[in-house]
Amino acid sequence: MQQKGQWSTKLGFILASAGAAIGLGAIWKLPYVTGENGGGAFFLLFVLFTLLIGLPMLISEFIIGRSTQKEAISAYKKLAPKSLWTWIGKFGVIGCFLLLSFYSVVGGWILIYTVKALAGKAIVPGVSAGDMFNQTVGSPSITILGVALFTLLNVIVVALGVQNGIEKSNKFMMPLLFLFFIILVIRSLTLDGAMEGVQFFLQPDFSKITGEGVLYALGQSFFALAVGFSCMVTYSSYLKKDESLPYSAGSVVLMNIFVSLLAGLAIFPAVFATGLEPTGGPGLLFVVLATVFGHLPFGEVFFAIFLLLFLFATLTSSFSLYEIIVAAFEAKFPNARRMITILLGVIVLVAAIPAALSTSTLSDVTIFGKTVFDATDYLVSNVMLPLGNLLIAIFIVHKVDKNLVEQEFFSSSRISTGYYRVWRFLMTFIVPVIIAIVLMYTASH
């Protein structure tokens, strides 16, 4: 039997886990959902949910994965054999597949924009950034080509495995992304009128928060940390026993919040400085950055570099989505990783076509008043992710042996018993109650 892959270093695992979380969640999605839900109050809720619910959930997935050394489906089978709890892993695999069906579309947009910028055609004098974005995503052939190329990149890296593919790429991509983001923030903050954007992003105005805004903030915290679909169960199953799970989870969460903060500070000052609307929706990032870079010397060069790094960040997230599905099938067919990855890529490409055409030929096709793209996004982010997290929260507290949980929590760390008690309290009383309330609100609306 093929030897199970493992992360070669703790840093490799943390960067890969951060890469799984940091991507479309922090960089693409957070700015536009923050803009659509009132700014500072939404961001504050997102941070609170990330610390009080996302972090405990991340530790829970790490415990399930590392304790069993199994991918998502097999992990639940090992901990709760011959029970319905094994469906949590299957639910995660289905959720990751649906997520990939619209995630790959945005990945394709980024890829096409990157190629355009490298060719000097992303910023055109006399053509507004908004028109350029609409022209790009309004072309059926371009959007489907983008999805196909994005899928191909995923297939190549994931087929190489954990150490040679995912870990090596993250060690290179993530530090570069952090560095360039800081440069972009500095530039954005020096634009005229930038402080109005900072105020919008960081000064909470709770009068702008609605029940739906709270739902989106919780969904965003799950989306941004990649918890709820057991991606992190699979990732932590490759982790050696001598690594601290709470420390690793804390590192991933802090990196995620930091990048989310950088994304807001890069986008919103630029939005207000250029007179754009913060409620620009999924295209906000592309329009704002093209507008900002269009006013800079060598702007297209900087835009191309940023898009390249953004593409890297998006790929690191999609690697984790592919990995949970590939690992589930690899458990049954241990010597067929490459073939499984290729077949999955073909299926994802076909499944992504309706969402890819939502901005062109299928723009009039709606599900509950939303395009296929928006409906899939809503189903995954605001229904399936909270439900997945609720099931995992109940499972880790009421089904997994308490001694096993404690052993994994304290393994190779000097974490105080007080920290464990707080985590246990949150997972028992706070996390499931808040998620259940939000899900009931969703069902009643």
Image (tube, rainbow, N blue to C red):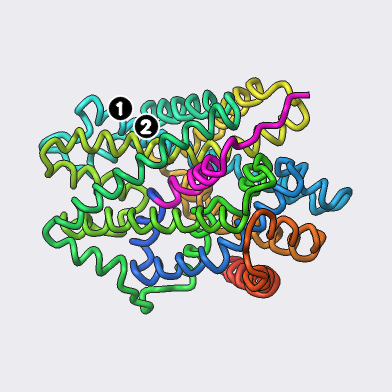
- Looking at the image, which is closer to me, 414 or 41? 414
Q: Does the magenta run of residues contain 18?
A: yes
Name the image quarter holding residue 381.
bottom right
Label drawn at residue 59 = none
- Mark 1 crowd level (few <14, some 14–19, many ≥20, 10 Å Cα): some
The quadrant of the image that shows the C terminus is: bottom right
Magenta range is: 1-26
Residue matched to label 1? 115
In the rendered image, residue 79, in percent from the top left (x then y), is placed at: 82, 51
Crowd class of label 2 (few under 14; some 14 to 19; many from 20; radius 10 Å):
many
Q: Amino acid at mark 1?
A: Val
Mark 2: amino acid: Leu
Q: Dot 2 corresponds to which residue?
A: 111
Q: As rendered, which of 64 and 172 lies closer to the eye?
A: 172
Position of residue 27 measured from the top left corner of the image (x, y, whole percent): 38, 49
Q: Is residue 392 left or right of residue 155?
A: right
Q: Secondary structure at mark 2?
A: helix
User: Quadrant of residue 402 in the image?
Assistant: bottom right
User: Which of these two is toward me, 372 or 243?
Assistant: 243
**Is label 2 in contact with label 1 (beta carbons under 8 Å)?**
yes
Measured Cα–Cα span from mark 2 to mark 1: 6 Å
Residue 88 position within the rendered picture, expressed as x and y whole percent measured from the top left: 73, 51
> How many numbered marks are there?
2
Q: Is residue 201 above or below residue 286?
A: below
Res. 407 visible in picture: yes
Q: Is residue 227 left or right of residue 22?
A: right
Q: Along the horizontal axis of the image, is 188 left or right of 64?
A: left
